[in-house]
Amino acid sequence: MMKSFIQNRLRRLAEKIIRTQRPKIVAVTGSVGKTSAKEAIAAVLGQEFRVRGAKKNYNNELGVPLTIIGADSPARSLLGWLAVWMRARKLAWSKAKDYPEWLVLELGADRKGDIQYLCDIAPPDVAVVTAVSAAHTEFFGSVEEVAEEKGALVRALKSGGIAVLNGDDPHVRDMEHDVKGTALLYGFGDEAVRADGVEMEFPDRGAWPRGMAAILRYHERAIPFMIEGAVGRHALYPALAGAAVGLAVGLSMEDVEEGLRHYLPPSGRMRLIPGIKNTLIIDDTYNSSPLAAIAAVETLAEIEPAGSGQGERYAVLGDMVELGNLALESHVAVGRRVAELGVDVLMTVGELGKEIGKSARAAGMAERRVEAYNNSEEAGLALQEKLEPGDVALVKGSQVVRMEKIVKEVMAEPLRAEELLVRMDESWAEK
């Protein structure tokens, strides 16, 4: 009852704030990559405009209005909610000189109609769709139904609005047919905004990678750019989304490149973390889905062990949830790919994770190279014992498996866990 009251009250105030302050709205949705794209877009637009991006993953019926208000969730604090109301009422009735010119909102969807509900609060001037995959099929039934829900963002665009679409994803590319304004595609193929010459950037021979480098192309222009602190071809998609939005609203290539210099991929998204014993950890623990897990394992396979070159590659993979009737085949597909790529050691976490291991063994991975653990605590202690200098470990799983606990166990500087890892605040302490 209280949540419903708060939700309705927030919605009305947020709608009034949008009408009073009149910011431009970039709305971002997709099965994966929403938060990273939001951060990249905010970094690029910030070169020219006052910008506010959604905090954390404020992407639902409470989070989106709180972003519009510019407030953190007070949780169960009545005094905190009173302060939010007071701030919201002031913004709803008086024009604020320092209110953002652009709001970059992240829109999530667990049920049909969620995207339209959020768009009714803040109708988008720019709609960005990052990807469509089997994530959340537990709620939607099929990938096609997920695509239909995500496509509601494109259909909700204001007259003359701009749709920025991942042209490498066929489900997203098909949304171009629903665009009533302008569509701008990004990706690695023949899209208008594209990247080529993609490669990992290494500071020295025999050293660990420090990021991803590529050439950004738009019409006849080309400019090099780099994303530091994360690896993987798919880690460049958020940067391309940010570049496409910037170019679509009139920024120069130079402004876009400068903005991308200020973009740091969020915690838990293919982030490079120094590990114990001179090892490297690829921290991809924010969440997981089949396509993202396979892309992460493919990136792991590209990294040469540092130093003597005798190190091993570890794939530490946990359950992927909210997949509905696609759960079994999705975990099987990931396990098969692990075996195909010749990963040295596979460590799984959780009951569904065991299906990854079974599939890897069935595809030819040696029995002694596959291990299963019940939870992240057990896996973290085991990985700590196993790692040797020169090893590299990918750690990935859905939020409920808490794979970040493994990273904390094996990172070289555990005192920086709150700064570098996901879910380190008090609200997650007992989960």
Image: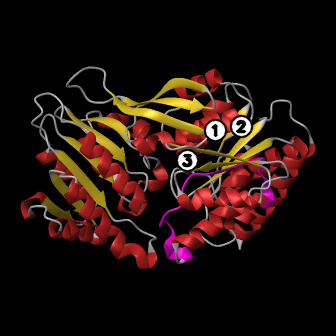
Read off the residue under disc 2. Answer: 248
Q: Quadrant of the N terminus?
A: bottom right
Distance, label 1 to label 2, CA atoms, is: 6 Å
Q: Are marks 2 and 3 in contact (CB under 8 Å)?
A: no
How many numbered badges does the structure rendering display?
Answer: 3
Task: Identify whether 198 is placed above or below 424.
Answer: above
Read off the residue under disc 3. Answer: 35
Task: Identify whether 31 is placed above or below 202.
Answer: below
| Mark 2 or mark 3, earlier in chain | 3
In the rendered structure, does residue 30 fall within the stretch colored magenta? no
In the rendered structure, does residue 128 fall within the stretch colored magenta? yes
Q: Residue at x 19, y 45 (%)?
A: 313
Q: Nearer the viewer, residue 169 or 66?
A: 169
Q: Are marks 1 and 2 in contact (CB under 8 Å)?
A: yes
Query: Could you say where residue 340 lies in the image, as x and y percent from the top left?
Result: 21, 57
Q: Quadrant of the C terminus?
A: bottom left
User: Residue 55's image quarter?
Assistant: top right
Read off the residue under disc 1. Answer: 244
Which of the labelled discs sits on residue 132, or is there none? none
Q: Nearer the viewer, mark 3 or mark 1?
A: 1
Residue 10, can we see it? no
Side of 110 relative to 268 (left or right): right
Q: Secondary structure at mark 3?
A: helix
Q: Residues within 10 Å of mark 1 (few under 14, many from 20)?
A: many
Residue numbers of the magenta segment: 120-140
Q: Nearer the viewer, residue 204 or 385?
A: 204
Query: Could you say where residue 48 lies in the image, as x and y percent from the top left?
Result: 72, 25
Q: Residue at x 84, y 59 (%)?
A: 12
